Image (tube, helix red, strand yellow):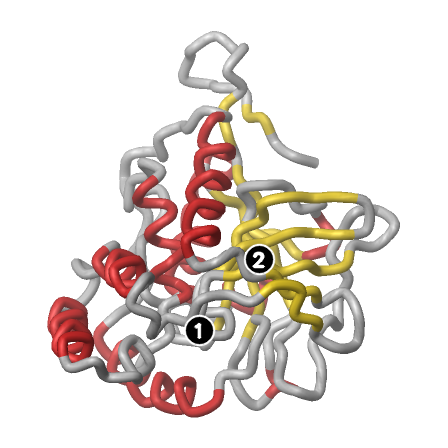
């Protein structure tokens, strides 16, 4: 969502054809989703901040017309973070038979001090999947995937079948003020003038691969949204985006450099811990 893709995204475009050929969005389970407590929100944020700090605490301010680097981050090829990216990929290794082989190839590169380690494929969706899996979220409630578009499709399926009982509800930007634990997503596909603008547009093409990027919301302040994402400039970084007067993410935040604009938010639906345990659990939703 934040940084132009360059050669890596050209490489991923080819690999994505293979991924799309054998991978489709899985239908919802027959059983309803498991409700999660409000504490999941804090746990997701804590996990993201832990990984961000391990990458050096890099911060990028995107509230103005130009990107401003407020603090540098460690790159994915730094020996101090090799094991972290390895962990992100291992969080999705069951998705495809080739992912374990990919990890082994990068491990071989690392042994040889190859400067291109972890460079062939984007790992931002694997990072989000790692956060969910580490926080205790089951794959039946959030589909761990190396592609943002596939876990988004699962969220759309779950919302269509279970409504607000689903862990995440996909919403257009105008429908929700992002809160910590939410995911903000952008369409990175080409050509740029054909990128998605609404949730309904993605619902019409479920199962088709599309280059996307999502970041986890970790803080909301007056006029500023703080997010943490993976593979942003080859690192886990915190980014600042502007908020409008109503606390929503405005449309059109992309620019001519190739930065994609957010087009939807995945709202985290959690159980009100003060409500009595029952099949009809009250949901605590950030409005």
- Name the quadrant containing residue 91: bottom left
Q: Which residue is mark 1?
A: 234
> Eyeballing the image, is 102 above or below 165?
below
- Camera-nearest residue between 46 and 216: 46
Q: Name the spot of residue 209 as percent of width and height, x first.
A: 39, 75
Q: Residue at 40% x, 28% y: name it.
A: 35
Q: Residue at 21% x, 62% y: name it.
A: 95
Q: Is residue 180 left or right of residue 242?
A: left
Q: Residue furthest top?
A: 276
Label 2: which secondary element: strand
Q: Name the spot of residue 62 as percent of width and height, x first.
A: 71, 67
Q: Residue at 71% x, 81% y: name it.
A: 255
> Eyeballing the image, is 100 above or below 132?
below
Q: Residue at 81% x, 51% y: name it.
A: 223
Q: How far separated are the C-alphas under marks 2 and 1?
A: 12 Å
The quadrant of the picture occupied by the C terminus is top right
Q: Which residue is mark 2?
A: 238
Q: Is residue 256 left or right of residue 275?
A: right
């Amino acid at each position: 969502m934040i940084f132009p893709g360059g050669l890596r995204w050209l490489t991923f475009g080819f690999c994505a054809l293979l991924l799309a050929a054998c991978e489709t969005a899985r239908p919802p389970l027959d059983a309803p989703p498991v409700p999660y407590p409000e504490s999941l929100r804090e746990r997701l944020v804590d996990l993201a901040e832990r990984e961000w700090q391990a990458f050096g605490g890099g911060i990028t301010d995107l509230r103005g017309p130009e990107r401003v680097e407020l603090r540098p981050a460690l790159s994915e090829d730094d020996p101090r973070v090799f094991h972290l990216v390895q962990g992100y990929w291992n969080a999705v290794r069951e998705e495809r038979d080739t992912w374990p082989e990919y990890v082994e190839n990068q491990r071989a590169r690392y042994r040889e001090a190859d400067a291109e380690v972890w460079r062939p494929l984007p790992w931002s969706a694997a990072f989000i999947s790692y956060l969910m899996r580490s926080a205790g979220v089951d794959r039946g409630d959030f589909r761990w995937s190396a592609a943002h578009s596939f876990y988004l499709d699962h969220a759309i399926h779950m919302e269509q079948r279970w409504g607000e009982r689903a862990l995440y509800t996909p919403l257009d930007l105008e429908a929700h003020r992002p809160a910590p634990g939410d995911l903000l997503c952008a369409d990175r596909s080409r050509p740029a003038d054909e990128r998605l603008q609404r949730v309904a547009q993605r619902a019409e093409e479920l199962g088709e691969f599309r280059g996307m990027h999502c970041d986890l919301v970790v803080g909301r302040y007056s006029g500023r949204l703080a997010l943490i994402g993976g593979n942003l400039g080859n690192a886990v970084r915190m980014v600042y985006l502007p908020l409008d007067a109503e606390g929503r993410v405005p449309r059109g935040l992309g620019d001519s450099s190739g930065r994609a604009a957010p087009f939807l938010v995945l709202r985290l639906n959690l159980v009100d811990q003060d409500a009595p345990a029952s099949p009809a659990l009250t949901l605590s939703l950030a409005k």
